Amino acid sequence: MAFDFLGTFTKSQFDRFAVWAKNQVSLIDARIAHLTAEKARIGNLAFAFDAGGIPTNIHGDFPTTYCGKLFAAYEALGGDAFYDLQVRNQGQPVFRVAGDEATESQLMSNGEVLGTAGLSDAESAEMVRQMRVWMAETTAYRRDALERKIKRALDYADQLQTEIDLLTTMKADATTGGSLSATIQDVTGLITDRQYMAASNDSKTPDPHGKMAKAPFAAYMPGGGGKGVQADSYERTLDGPVTPSTEDPA
């Protein structure tokens, strides 16, 4: 695996990785253009809900996009989106509404009341099961399959937008948190921090292949502060990796 490291590496290894990553920035605009075109092909299907979680509106570019065609097929086959579909995109999460010191939580954010164990519904359940059993395949084909396709398409559209947002952040300059330039700057700061030995500063003893990257941390600095004293073992020190034949780099 290329650049097979995460938090433990040498400066030489990271420098190579940083150069590679910077070279990929030139491809970002083309990737964003491709993702944007794909997102336009998939389209968007979004519900608006009131405070109680009841759908109030459906909006999206229905006629031409993939989502639009699926939605049209869903309605043509008898589906009622306001009652049966009610899909949500990534920006409309459902969560449990917090209670307070006097009242426990009883609602979800979509207006659904939290139930308790034991439904006591055996009699009605058996009757509804009898109503379903003879048309199970028809229901699965005409409704369930389309619902799954619509939900997968919306998930895909959300994933495309997430990647577009990530790439847009990556190509920003070092003043933007999370950008490639800012992250390289932050990692470089760790490498130059003598107290952070996981990212070894191997400037004095180059280790481009990372053979010493996971050497044990030194219990004390070789030589006790005096130059010319050799280390006893392979280890990482405040001043980079050392070998038994390496003089104290201090």
Image (tube, rainbow, N blue to C red):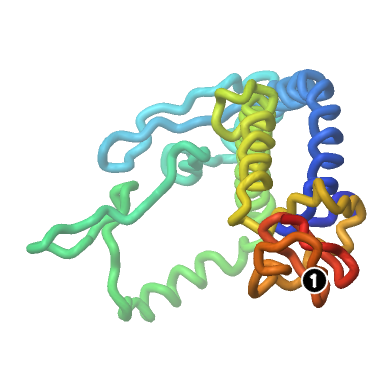
Instruction: Tell me residue 199's x, y (percent).
Output: 70, 54
* Tally of numbered discs: 1
**Left or right of residue 76: residue 241:** right
Residue kind at label 1, given as amino acid type: Ala
Q: Can you say whether 57 is above or below 122 in the image?
A: above
The residue pinned by badge 1 equals 231
Q: Is residue 46 above or below residue 147?
A: above
Locate residue 246 relative to residue 150 in the image: left or right: right
The answer to whether any part of residue 161 appears in the image is no
Report the residue at 64% width, 49% height from top: 148
Q: Residues within 10 Å of mark 1 (few under 14, many from 20)?
A: some
x and y percentages locating residue 44 in the rendered image = 59, 27
Quarter placement of the N terminus: bottom right
Judge from the rendering whether residue 165 lies leftward or rightward of residue 49; answer left or right: right
Q: Secondary structure at mark 1?
A: loop
Residue lying at 52% horizontally and 40% vertically, measured from the top left? 90
Which percent across, then down, holds residue 222? 72, 68
Up the image or down, 3 lies above or below 234; here it is: above
